[in-house]
């Protein structure tokens, strides 16, 4: 489907079709790895909600859903690594196979925190599935088992990702025009 980008978007980095086929690939790997044992998907709100909805609908193994909401202190475009839990898990994860679903790994600080937090609850297994991974950052101290796309170090929006809570509903991943940032400069 051809699409006209939102006027605030400088360029579409990953199209709707590219996202769709990547999700089919990721879902095939996840299906193969977990099989009938199934998996508990834990989405990190809010960014992961669009990705998780599409990923889940491509999986035909038994899945349960849970969500965590965190806020990281920092500016709108840079996380500080200090994470506050706004919404904890609804389910007990002890003994469960847990797959943490994220929209993007940038510094890796948010995921590092969540991994420590979840590991303390003794899941049977704990893996990460992130749609995006920004390159050019320091190496992260954990393994990302399922990665959609490695992207350059630019600030992106769409498909769940926001700038100041906007643009989450765009069906593609795009780079914002500088003017759209207002006062805050992207990295
Ligand atoms: P990290 O802790 O630096 O890995 O940052 C991860 C979180 O920062 C993500 O869950 C996003 O909410 C946010 N984030 C990082 N980079 C971007 C971006 O390019 N666009 C939108 N949000 C981002
Ligand atoms: Mg955000």
Image (cartoon, rainbow, N blue to C red):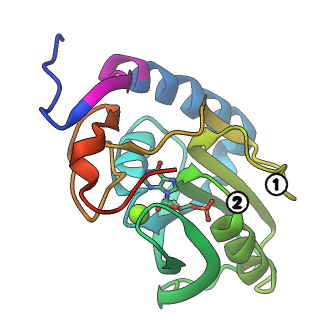
Q: Is residue 115 magenta?
A: no
Q: Which residue is denoted by mark 1 in the rendering?
A: 140
Q: For the residue with label 1, is its CB less than 8 Å from the closest atom of ligand 1?
A: yes
Is residue 80 in view from this perspective? yes
Q: Which residue is denoted by mark 2 in the rendering?
A: 108
Is residue 168 in view from this perspective? no
Pointer 2 and pointer 1: residues touching (CB < 8 Å)?
yes
Would residue 45 be found to the left or right of residue 4 on screen? right
User: Marks 2 and 1, Cα distance to the nearest angstrom?
Assistant: 6 Å
Q: Residue 184: horizontal and vertical position, in percent?
A: 35, 62
Place residue 14 in its image quadrant: top left
Q: Neighbour class for label 1 at 10 Å: few (<14), some, many (≥20)?
A: some
**Residue at far top of view:** 2
Q: At 66% from the left edge and 79% from the top edge, which residue is drawn? A: 93
Task: Give the total number of marks visible in the rendering.
Answer: 2
Which quadrant is the N terminus positioned in? top left
**Secondary structure under the numbered disc 1 in the rendered image:** loop
Q: Camera-side residue: 176 or 166?
A: 176
Q: For the residue with label 2, is its CB less than 8 Å from the closest atom of ligand 1?
A: yes
In the displayed structure, 176 sits above or below 140; it is above
The first of marks 2 and 1 along the sequence is: 2
Q: Camera-side residue: 25 or 73?
A: 73
**Secondary structure under the numbered disc 2 in the rendered image:** loop
Q: At 76% from the left edge and 85% from the top edge, which residue is drawn? A: 121
Would residue 30 be found to the left or right of residue 65 on screen? right
Q: Camera-side residue: 27 or 141?
A: 141
Q: Which residues are magenta?
A: 10-18
Place residue 98 in its image quadrant: bottom right
Would residue 145 be found to the left or right of residue 25 on screen? right
Q: At 43% from the left edge and 35% from the top edge, which residue is drawn? A: 58
Q: Residue 41: horizontal and vertical position, in percent?
A: 54, 60
Q: At 81% from the left edge and 68% from the top edge, which residue is drawn? A: 124
């Amino acid at each position: 489907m051809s699409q006209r980008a939102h006027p605030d978007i400088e360029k579409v980095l990953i199209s709707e079709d590219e996202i769709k086929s990547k999700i089919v690939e990721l879902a095939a790997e996840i299906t193969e790895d977990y099989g009938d044992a199934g998996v508990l998907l834990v989405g990190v709100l809010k960014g992961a909600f669009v990705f998780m909805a599409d990923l889940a609908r491509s999986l035909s193994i038994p899945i349960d859903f849970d969500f965590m909401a965190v806020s990281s202190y920092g500016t709108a475009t840079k996380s500080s690594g200090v994470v506050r839990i706004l919404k904890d898990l609804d389910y007990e994860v002890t003994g469960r196979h847990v797959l943490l679903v994220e929209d993007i790994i940038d510094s890796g600080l948010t995921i590092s925190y969540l991994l420590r937090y979840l590991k303390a609850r003794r899941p049977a297994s704990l893996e990460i599935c992130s749609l995006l991974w920004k390159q050019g950052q320091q190496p992260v101290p954990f393994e990302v088992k399922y990665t959609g796309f490695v992207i350059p170090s630019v600030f992106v929006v769409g498909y769940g990702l926001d700038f100041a809570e906007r643009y989450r509903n765009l069906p593609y991943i795009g780079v914002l025009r500088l003017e759209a940032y207002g006062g805050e400069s992207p990295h």
